Structures are given as C-alpha cells and as structure tokens.
Amino acid sequence: MNLNIKNLVLPISLGLVIGISSCKKDKDNDPDNSTTGIRTKIEYSKVTPGTPYKNLFVDSKGDTIVDLSSGNTKLKMFQALNYYLGAAIRDSKSLDSMTMLNMFNNMNSAFYDVASLNIIGSNLNASGIQLRSITASSAGSKSEQERLRIERLFGDMARLSQHFADTAINGQPGRVGNYLADAKGIEVAQIIQKSLIGATQLDYIGNVLLNTGLNADNSTIITGKPYTQLEQNWDEAYGFLTLNPIYLAGSTDAAKGTTEYFLGSYIWEYNKQAYAQIYPAFLKGRVAISNNDINEAKAQANFIRTSMEKSLAAAAVGYLNKWKTGTTEAARIHAMGEGLGFIYSLRYCKVYGADDIFSESVLSMLMDSPGGYWDLTNTKINNAIQAISTKFSL
C-alpha cells in the first residue's frame, strides 16, 4: 500500500444546512440588536459553568427547545467508524473497505451495536444522516475530490489490515507494537481519524455552523419543530462536539471530568488556557441567540473557533515532539501518524488563515522522500514545528 500523504487534501464544499436570513427589521428597530426576537430575554447572569445546556432554553410551556440529536448522531457515527478501524489490531482481523465506505455514506445498514460506546446501530442506520455530506463542507468545488480521497483511504486501510501478522520495516507494511503502519511507516488509521477531526468535525462546526450558519433565520419557528434554524445550527454544533450536558464538567488541567471524543478531547489535552471557557462560550452564545443578540453570538462563536483551531495546531506540534522523545519504534510511528493527520487538518483552520497550501508545505517537509517515516530527522521535525508554531502563534 502506498499512502500518498502529500496529496491528502480534503477541500471542503459548503452546501448544507444553512437557512440564510438576517432580521433586518429587528436590527433597524433595536440599535444594539440585543433585545428583539421571538423569545423571552434571558439574563446573561444566568450563564454559569454548572448550568446544563438545555436548562435555560424552553418554550412558553416550559418544554426544552434544544435538540442535540443531529449533532450527537454525527458524533456517534464517527465513533462507530473509528471503532471499526481499530478492529484490525483489537481483533486481529482484516477490514472490509465497503463496510467503512457504507458507514461514511450511511448505506446498506452498515452500523452495528457497540455496547461500550452506547451505540445502537439500527438508530444510526435509520437516522437519514451521513458523515460524507458534511465532510470538507467549506471547500466549494473541491469538496467532492476531498471526500473521494477519504474513501480511498478506506481501501488503503483494508489492504494494510491484511498485514496484522507481519512486522513493519522500511518498505514493508505490518505491525509495530499495537499499531499498523504501511510501507512508508504511516499509521493509516490515525490519518483517517485525524483527517476526519479536521475535515468533518472542525470544519462543519467551525466553518459552517458557527460561521456561515450564523446568518440563518432566527425569526421563524421551523414547521413541526420548537426552534429556529439559527437555534438549531448552534445546538447541532454543540451536539457534534460532545455527548455531555456540560462539556468537560469538573475537569482540571490534570484530569478530564467527562469522557470526550476526538476534537472535544484534544481541546482539553492541548489547550489548557482555553478549554474551561469553551462550555461557557457555547452557553452564552446560545443565550445571545435567544435574545437575538447576534453580535454577541458571533463573538462567542469566534472564541470557540479560535480555541478549537489552536488546539489542533498544538496537537500537531505535540505529536511531532513525541516523535523526538519516543523511546520505541512503535511510540514514534504512532506519534507521527497522529501528527501527520493533525497537520493535514490544519487546512481547515480558517480563523488563523491556514489552508491546503500551508498544510501541504508542512507535510512535504516531513514526508517528501522515498522512505517517508523511515527517513525522518530532527531537522525535518524541527522545521515543521517552527512553521506551525509561527502560523498559530504557539
């Protein structure tokens, strides 16, 4: 198998959920755009780190208007696909590329129950939701090309999984410790996981729902639903980040207080300055939407987006440093697989002005040689760390 990491470009299409309609009438009648709207105003003083997400947002009958199911379903689909990727090592089995493809596209009832993750396969299969349609959402005409590249990685992973009993060496795919690496020493499972964190989770939350999605209608309740499109966009973003009613509740710098996955976990691990402020920002932004205070909602969204992007950049640097400090081949290969996947995902960090050109330039510093991982040097690693640190002011 030959994974061409340099060409892992997941550009992003933007045609999804966003009902785009701003309340010009409200802005004209309310100069600070803070009190008009269809909801009873909520005082910002009610926002506390211990307030469960749904508690403040109710209709006149006291029923919640928050629906996190769409975001949560996407997150569980990501969990299910990632769980299947792990079967090559966990269960010593060859994987099927069609199973991965069907999970990505939500076709042919590919999802199955995973009790340890509280995943009910039939619910995912029947949801009408798929990861593919939101992958690379903000890349315009290149989005389909990027989705196809992800799908080709499924084929790479399936072929690599057949070598679970072999030993990985330069030019030979196989197992090293608890990981599978291709002939260039690349852990394909990590490339898939980290690429989806960027191309699906970060891009859809940050560049769609909390960016263009903030232009959605906030003056009309969607027929048959209790919320406006803007309210739902914000709630879907939160639900795609975490399955918990309070994100990272009880967490300290030393320990996570809740079980989080993917982007939600790496924010805590690699952004100690901001992780505790993410939940209050989500809550305050949602209050701002109830109050039709769109400027405040945008301010909170910008903080969340900036923090998420910085977390991925810090993760990329962190794993490059783990390659330098790793004491076994397995540790170094695993660190590099995670690092390369995060570097790829940096192209979705729009707040910091990163793009595919920047991402590809860093990947080239590391992998533009016949041996890939096997040809790495401290100089290559340090140059990549410097480029990322400069771009993201780390």
Image (tube, rainbow, N blue to C red):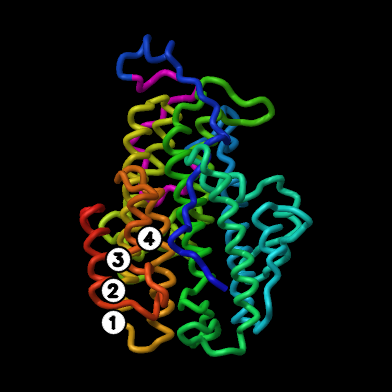
Sequence order check, earlier mark of 4 and 3: 3
**Identity, as a three-letter code, of the amino acid under mark 2:** Asn
Distance from the alpha carbon under mark 2 to that under mark 1: 6 Å
Q: In the rendered structure, does residue 144 fall within the stretch colored magenta?
A: no
156 above or below 203? below
For the residues bearing labels 2 and 3, Cβ distance under 8 angstroms: yes
Sequence order check, earlier mark of 1 and 4: 1
Question: Which label belongs to residue 325?
Answer: 1
Q: Nearer the viewer, residue 359 or 327?
A: 359
Q: How crowded is mark 2: few (under 14 residues within 10 Å), some or many (20 or more)?
A: some
For the residues bearing labels 2 and 1, Cβ distance under 8 angstroms: yes
Q: Which of 58 and 388 is in front in this view?
A: 388
The residue at which mark 4 appears reads as 343
Asked whether residue 318 is in view, the answer is yes
Q: How crowded is mark 4: few (under 14 residues within 10 Å), some or many (20 or more)?
A: many
Asked whether residue 279 is in view, the answer is no
Question: Which label belongs to residue 321?
Answer: 2
Distance from the alpha carbon under mark 2 to that under mark 3: 6 Å
Distance from the alpha carbon under mark 1 to that under mark 4: 19 Å
Residue shown at 45% from the left, 27% from the top = 215
**Residue 110 rendering spot, x and y as whole percentages:** 74, 60
**Identity, as a three-letter code, of the amino acid under mark 3:** Val
For the residues bearing labels 4 and 2, Cβ distance under 8 angstroms: no
